[in-house]
């Protein structure tokens, strides 16, 4: 009997490159152990007249990538991250043309609709920083009157690009720092509140940016930190927390993203460096995990089947847990970096195990 095939759908970057080849190679290797064929493709690789695709595969023995023509798979794992290019339209077209396929995860909206959805849930609401949509300069000025620390972040941004931290000082001045649209660190500067929107107007703030209450994230050495929690469906289709790691940003950075130069630390090590009470640390950990279950259930009820979700979580100096944002297409390298090999391998394996479970249910 032939093994089922899982198609991992991605989007090309510039020059037809794929950004997650190392992850895809590991998926193929783990799939082989689970008797699951794993192939990689993009919506640009579809041959609609033949119901086939030009699939990218990996020969483990030869350690080489190669392409071949394959039927469009019945199972698909969507790893397509948002792009402001024609490729994202092709992704939507593919989903429209092939609704009969079993997708192990469905697309979600940008940060603002997701925030609004989560805010409706009374259990989740207390964990959300106050957030509004940027429509005009007066929105930011009013927000700064209520919060001494504010973040400006793009609704569809990833990897820390285009995020500003604005700290209210005295005499109408603010300290502005962050990362530009290319993720480069912006030198901190003092500006009048009224100047901020003018200075960054070229970023397209109106209707594309969110204004969010800032949570104190600085460690004693001044570097910011947060936690990345990964929750996934397991081999019987149930949500289970796979792991959680701490992230510490580089000096002068307002974000902790690993792509932006951040470093990873075991979650418990980072918590123990900040809180002396074991009971308090266990309470924080339990709160994070309970929150993650509430979040994925709420999101899945709205957007349809999901297989995994990463939560970016902040913990204030008092131990209060805050949900900064969610990521439906998470990387898992953070667990490799902190040498939690078992967790790292589980994070790779679980989407495959869930795909096999789904395949058996449909059979």
Image (tube, rainbow, N blue to C red):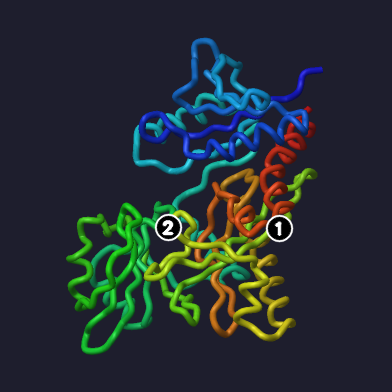
Instruction: Tell me which corner region of the image, top left, top right, bottom left or bottom right, holds residue 354.
Output: top right
Q: Is residue 64 above or below residue 315?
A: above
Q: Report how far apart the C-alphas of labels 2 and 1 lie in the structure.
A: 25 Å
Q: Residues within 10 Å of mark 2 (few under 14, many from 20)?
A: some
- Which residue is outermost to the bottom? 171
Q: Which residue is mark 1?
A: 241
Instruction: Tell me which corner region of the image, top left, top right, bottom left or bottom right, holds residue 169.
Output: bottom left
User: Left or right: 209 with respect to 282?
Assistant: left
Instruction: Tell me which corner region of the image, top left, top right, bottom left or bottom right, holds residue 206.
Output: bottom left
* Residue at (38% x, 78% y) in the render: 149
Q: Nearer the viewer, residue 81 or 306?
A: 81
Q: Position of residue 287 (x, y in %)?
A: 67, 72
User: Left or right: 50 with respect to 280?
Assistant: left
Q: Which residue is mark 2?
A: 260
User: Left or right: 210 with respect to 115?
Assistant: left
Numbered badge on residue 10: none
* Residue at (60% x, 81% y) in the render: 274
Q: What element does badge 2 sit on?
A: helix
Q: Position of residue 137 (x, y in %)?
A: 23, 69
Q: Position of residue 159 (x, y in %)?
A: 44, 54
- Which residue is outermost to the right? 1
| Quadrant (top left/top right/bottom left/bottom right) for the N terminus | top right
- Which residue is outermost to the front? 62
Q: Which mark lies nearer to you, 2 or 1?
A: 2
Q: What element does badge 1 sit on?
A: strand
Q: Nearer the viewer, residue 293 or 247?
A: 247
Asked if labels 1 and 2 touch by Cβ distance under 8 angstroms, the answer is no
User: Left or right: 174 with respect to 346?
Assistant: left
**Residue 226 seen in the current view:** yes
Q: Earlier in the sequence, mark 2 or mark 1?
A: 1
């Amino acid at each position: 009997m032939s093994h089922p095939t899982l198609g991992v759908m991605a989007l090309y970057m510039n020059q037809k490159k794929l950004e997650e080849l190392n992850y895809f190679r590991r998926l193929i290797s783990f799939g082989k152990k689970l008797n699951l064929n794993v192939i990689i493709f993009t919506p640009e690789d579809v041959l609609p007249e033949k119901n086939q695709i030009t699939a990218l595969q990996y020969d483990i023995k030869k350690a080489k990538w190669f392409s071949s023509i394959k039927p469009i798979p019945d199972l698909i794992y969507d790893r397509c991250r948002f792009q402001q290019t024609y490729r994202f339209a092709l992704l939507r077209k593919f989903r429209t043309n092939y609704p009969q396929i079993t997708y192990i995860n469905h697309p979600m909206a940008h940060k603002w609709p997701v925030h609004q959805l989560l805010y409706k849930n009374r259990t989740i609401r207390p964990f959300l920083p106050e957030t509004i949509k940027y429509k005009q300069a007066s929105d930011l000025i009013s927000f700064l009157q209520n919060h001494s620390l504010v973040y400006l972040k793009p609704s569809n941004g990833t990897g820390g690009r285009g995020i500003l931290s604005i700290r209210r000082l005295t005499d109408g001045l603010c300290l502005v720092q962050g990362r530009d649209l290319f993720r480069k660190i912006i030198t901190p500067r003092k500006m009048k509140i009224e100047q901020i929107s003018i200075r960054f107007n070229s970023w397209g703030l109106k209707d594309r940016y969110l204004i969010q209450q800032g949570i104190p994230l600085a460690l004693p050495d001044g570097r910011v930190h947060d936690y990345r929690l990964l929750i996934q469906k397991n081999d019987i289709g149930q949500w289970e927390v796979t792991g959680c790691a701490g992230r510490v940003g580089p000096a002068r950075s307002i974000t902790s993203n690993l792509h932006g130069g951040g470093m990873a630390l075991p979650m418990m090590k980072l918590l123990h460096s900040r809180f002396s009470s074991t009971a308090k640390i266990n309470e924080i950990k339990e709160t994070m995990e309970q929150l993650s279950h509430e979040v994925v259930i709420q999101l899945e009820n709205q957007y349809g089947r999901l297989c995994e979700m990463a939560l970016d979580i902040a913990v204030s100096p008092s131990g209060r847990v805050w949900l900064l944002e969610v990521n439906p297409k998470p990387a898992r390298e953070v667990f490799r970096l902190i040498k939690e090999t078992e967790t790292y391998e589980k994070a790779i394996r679980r989407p495959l195990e869930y795909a096999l479970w789904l395949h058996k249910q449909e059979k």
